[in-house]
Amino acid sequence: MKAIVCVKQVPDTSGKVAYKPDGTLDRASMDVVTNPDDLNALEAALTLKDETGCEVVVISMGPDPAEGMLRELLARGADRAILVSGREFGGSDTFATSQILAAAVNRVGLGPDDIVFCGRQAIDGDTAQVGPQIAEKLHLPQVSYAAEIKKDGNKLTVKRMLEDGFMMLSVETPCLITCIKELNQPRYMNIKGIFECYDKRIERFDYEALKDDPLIETDTIGLKGSPTNVFKAFTPPLKGAGAMLNGDDAAAKLASILAEKHLI
Amino acid sequence: MTDFSDYKGIWVFCEQRSGELMPTDFELVSEASRLAKEIGCKVTGVVLGNGMEAASKELGGYGADEVMVCDDPLLEVYTTDAYTKVLCDLVNEYKPEVLLMGATNIGRDLGPRCAARLHTGLTADATHLDVDTKEYIEFLRNASTIDVETVKLDEADRNLKMTRPAFGGHMMATIICPRFRPQMSTVRPGVMKRAAFDQAKADACQVIKPAFSITKEDIHVEVLSVEKAAKKMVDLIGANVVVSVGRGISKNVKEGLALAEKLADAMGGVVGASRAVVDAGWISSDHQVGQTGKTVHPKVYVALGISGAIQHVAGMQDSELIIAVNKNESAPIFGAADYGIVGDLFKVVPDLLKAIESERAAR
Ligand SMILES: Cc1cc2nc3c(=O)[nH]c(=O)nc-3n(C[C@H](O)[C@H](O)[C@H](O)COP(=O)(O)OP(=O)(O)OC[C@H]3O[C@@H](n4cnc5c(N)ncnc54)[C@H](O)[C@@H]3O)c2cc1C
Ligand SMILES: Cc1cc2nc3c(=O)[nH]c(=O)nc-3n(C[C@H](O)[C@H](O)[C@H](O)COP(=O)(O)OP(=O)(O)OC[C@H]3O[C@@H](n4cnc5c(N)ncnc54)[C@H](O)[C@@H]3O)c2cc1C
């Protein structure tokens, strides 16, 4: 049995955000972090490993620096780490990304007891589309927004969150689950893991390694092939600063403005 | 260039829960009707459920020319497998040019699965849509820092231009899908304006019941139960006034919440919150405004003790009037506000409550 976890390295959008002179985001100068939801996905896999002794495989598509993140995930307890990297893959939209990741999962080999875990959403692209699209490409049943997972043999019972409540769902392996932060509390690296992660090799899948997979359509990967294109990217203008109301009677001034506008 | 002349019309997937259409459905149909005028085509609402025929005609009152209704016990409750199969089969048969759905927890499960099966692109969580290039340039003039005089765009371009926030609201991107059809987007709930309801149009709305097939064997995830949240959820999106609290209430959480409650009552509104307040467990998550909470655009938004992080501002910046109270005069929230008061909310709010009362008494 295997738990395969898809993990993305992302710029830290919660910290200082840097812009280039032309107003576009300066990704190069921003800190990178492991996508938060993906740590919950890894934790779900490691919990299964604690219970069943299964193998945990982490896969990330991205440029070379993602190796550092993968090594950290090994230190947290993953058994194998794979970096999917290649010039041909750059600029992929979610359709293309999911195709490449699905092919990578195929190459690892998906058995009848296996589960693929994704985060719900990456904090940079913010689409939450890659998980369900991998599931479709691999013909796997999917459960998104998982807040609780119980496993009994090949059957999983999953609590799937809705805006106004939740659903309890039952699904059998192999399947794909997307995880949210309510699912668990990700563990830290341990000393043993930190020592051992340097003995493990980070495997690499490049374009050559994946191109013969039937899921890879050479005309829908990368920047050129992606079905969606970024037509324009821009920054929203800041609203001009409003009026500051000062003095002891600030609240009274505000109330009379609201009354004038018929808002109270 | 591929020939798309077979693809016609705008479809809106209209989600129902427990047999009731969702508010987003009406917003989307209204928006689709606006776009249909730019394209010169029909709007079709697509409803999957069980016994939805009568309720679906209401969509006509907001701009749907027709509704396509698929009723089946296996469609009563949402499952990814059944909905994907039925919707994709219909799309392949009728070939709409555009397919929109609400970016709800269900739309964001169904949309990507369908796009992958239909072999087309999908824009996530759009907040603005255009077909006409001139309209798009006008939109850029107001919504971007781009100098539109320098922008050269092909006026004949009829691709759907789908604009969405990314990088946690730090950046906007307009997405197109030029090589495949349908052009698909999920659309953020609460953003598109609902049209005025027109009873005559609702009555005139045609109901189509297309042939479809769905069996138990198509469904690989079993629904054991659907639970509604025990407490009634706060209706942030529909509210005229939202009074939100932030970590600034921390020195007396109970009192801070009570003050927000009182102010909301006095102004006919509801209480919202920043994520910091939700994460601290002071209020339930249905109150959260922002990128990972709800997007609101009330007539008045009051931010009490909220710093104004971009992820929060992303969810309230389109409110008609924004008022901020913060003890730190350089808090970023003042940059988003129409009126700001620098001060301790535990003093300013009681003052404001009194002032509102005397304004009312004076009338
Ligand atoms: C401004 C901007 C807007 C965009 N808008 C769209 C759009 O509307 N539609 C579209 O199709 N594409 C869009 N893209 C492209 C999209 O961001 C990329 O395809 C990205 O690689 C994946 O999407 P995401 O970051 O939204 O991931 P999500 O779909 O949010 O990620 C969900 C989960 O999938 C897994 N995952 C995602 N990417 C990887 C990876 N590289 N390696 C391993 N696991 C991964 C992780 O488990 C993650 O938690 C946009 C890109 C930009 C820069
Ligand atoms: C991926 C991601 C998604 C996020 N999504 C959201 C989201 O959806 N919604 C959201 O809100 N946040 C979101 N956040 C969190 C966001 O970045 C901020 O951390 C959060 O909004 C801060 O909440 P706050 O303003 O209440 O708290 P703080 O930033 O701590 O601000 C408290 C403010 O209160 C003021 N204050 C203190 N005492 C008083 C007093 N007595 N009277 C008046 N003012 C006082 C202080 O001056 C300060 O400005 C997200 C973050 C990330 C990384």
Image: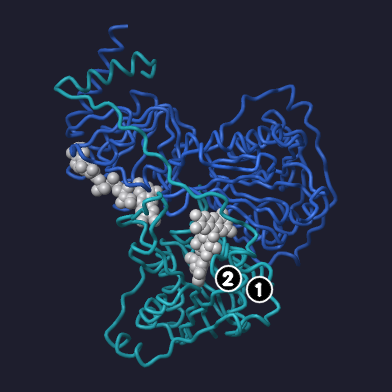
Chain colours: A cyan, B blue
Q: Residue furthest bottom?
A: A199
As helix, strand or loop, the secondary structure at mark 2 comes to strand
Q: Look at the picture and state if B81 lies above or below B296.
A: below
Say which mark, if any, is on residue A176: 2
As helix, strand or loop, the secondary structure at mark 1 comes to loop
Q: Residue furthest right?
A: B211
Q: Determine whether the beta carbon of the residue marked 2 sits less than 8 angstroms from the nearest atom of ligand 1.
A: no
Q: Name the spot of residue A121 as percent of width and height, x first.
A: 48, 60
Front-lying residue, B192 or A118: B192
The residue depicted at 30 percent of the width and 56 percent of the height is: A16
Q: Name the spot of residue A218 as percent of width and height, x first.
A: 68, 73
Q: Name the spot of residue B3 as percent of width and height, x first.
A: 80, 53
Q: Name the spot of residue A122 as percent of width and height, x first.
A: 46, 62
Q: Hey, what amino acid is under mark 1?
A: Leu
The residue depicted at 17 percent of the width and 19 percent of the height is: A249
In this figure, what is the number of numbered marks?
A: 2
In the image, taking residue A237 as reference, residue B260 lies left or right, namely left
Residue A178 appears in the figure? no
Front-lying residue, B277 or B233: B277
Say which mark, if any, is on residue A138: 1
Front-lying residue, B297 or B247: B297
Counting other residues with Cα less than 10 Å from the Cα at mark 2, is it few (<14), some (14-19), or many (20 or more)? many
Is mark 1 in CB contact (under 8 Å) with mark 2? yes
